[in-house]
Image (tube, rainbow, N blue to C red):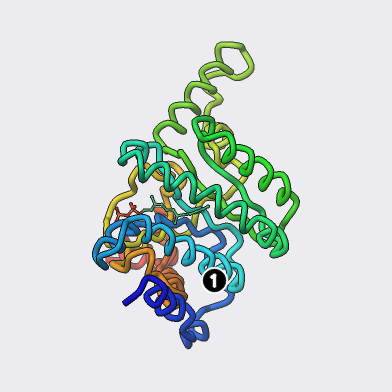
Amino acid sequence: MSFQKINMKLQNSTNQNTDLICQIDKLRIPKHVAIIMDGNGRWGIKRGLTRSYGHNQGVFILKNIIKLAKKIGVEVLTVYAFSTENWSRPQGEVKFLLNLFEKVLNKETVEINKECIKLNFIGDFSPFPENLKQIINSSQALTKDNNEFTLNVCANYGSRQELINAAKNLAKRSVSGEIKPEQINEGLFESELLTKEFKDPDLLIRTSGEIRLSNFLLWQLAYSEIYITDVMWPEFNDDEFLKAIINYQSRNRRFGGIESLSNKSFKNSFYSS
Ligand code: FPP
């Protein structure tokens, strides 16, 4: 089968109609969804194609998921596009990925803006090629006032580095006398994170069956619901996203408390005998 035919087949498969949408509780949509888009490379190779082919298909899937997430009422989508560890991949793949980001931004920024989506990059993009840095800056500037939906793209992002930088900044502020060490609390710590404008993700989705966080949003995911699927990112279609949302809606989020047990039943179960 030719590349084009495979692509057509997959593109169609992402647009299956979804009875699942009727099962969604519109009042309990996760406001912030984070995604580790994993499995592009393996998916490409498994089909006798290339890892790059998998990344290209990954972009197509991302576009669909952005549209669907916005449509059902998600407000913020944060995706892991390039980690600080991804520099250790073969140079050719790193180059391909950075070129791909540039191409996608050049091609899609106008459309993203029309859709009233705010595009925000999270990470240290100083080592990126000049052209990529420029398009990142201009696409952020163009979309900065959009308020219907935010797409955060984590690029050259690593959570441990983010936490170290936050600790360094708080130490500097403390040495300069601006704050006292005793004042450091969760709020102040969060004010030094790259995600300071956003509430923590309600839901983390990871594709390709890997069960780890891979240095992604370690602080921010403390109380997020985690959904792992074996589906590879290039095959993560609309139905797969809706399944993740429905699964999230079946969870009882207690944030360390015991919401399902009222004070009364607590008394009954522990003190009445
Ligand atoms: C993980 O698959 C995927 C990536 C490292 C890149 C994801 C990037 C995109 C989908 C493009 C997004 C573009 C923009 C502009 C936001 P992997 O290569 O780790 O797959 P593997 O686990 O099978 O090796």
Left or right of 214 on screen, residue 122: right
Where, quadrant-wise, is the C terminus in this rendering? bottom left
Return the residue found at the far front.
2
**Residue shown at 51% from the left, 18% from the top:** 171
- Residue 213 lies, with reference to residue 191, above or below; the image says below
Viewer can see residue 120 = yes
Quadrant in which residue 56 is drawn:
bottom left
Please name whichever residue, 121 or 166, is drawn nearer the observer in this view of the structure: 121
**In this picture, residue 157 sits left or right of residue 268:** right
Which residue lies most toward the top here?
A: 176
In this image, 181 relative to 230: left or right?
Answer: right
- Label total for image: 1
On the image, the x and y values in percent for residue 271 come to 32, 61
**Position of the N terminus by quadrant:** bottom left
Q: Is residue 246 visible?
A: no
Instruction: Give residue 125's position: percent from left, percent from top.
Output: 53, 35
Position in image of residue 81 (x %, y %): 45, 49
What residue sits 55% from the left and 16% below the top?
172
Residue in the image at 43% along x and 47% along y: 97
- The image quadrant that residue 73 belongs to is bottom right
* Of 195 and 202, the residue lying toward us: 195
Q: Residue at x 66, y 54 (%)?
A: 118
**On the rendered structure, is 54 left or right of 198?**
left
Q: Is residue 207 above or below residue 256?
A: below
Find out if the beta carbon at label 1 lies less than 8 Å from the nearest ligand 1 atom. Answer: no
Label 1 crowd bin: few (<14), some (14–19), many (20+), radius 10 Å: some
Q: Amino acid at mark 1?
A: Arg
Q: Position of residue 179 (x, y in %)?
A: 60, 19
In terms of secondary structure, where does tag 1 sit?
A: helix
Where is mark 1, residue-wise? Answer: 28
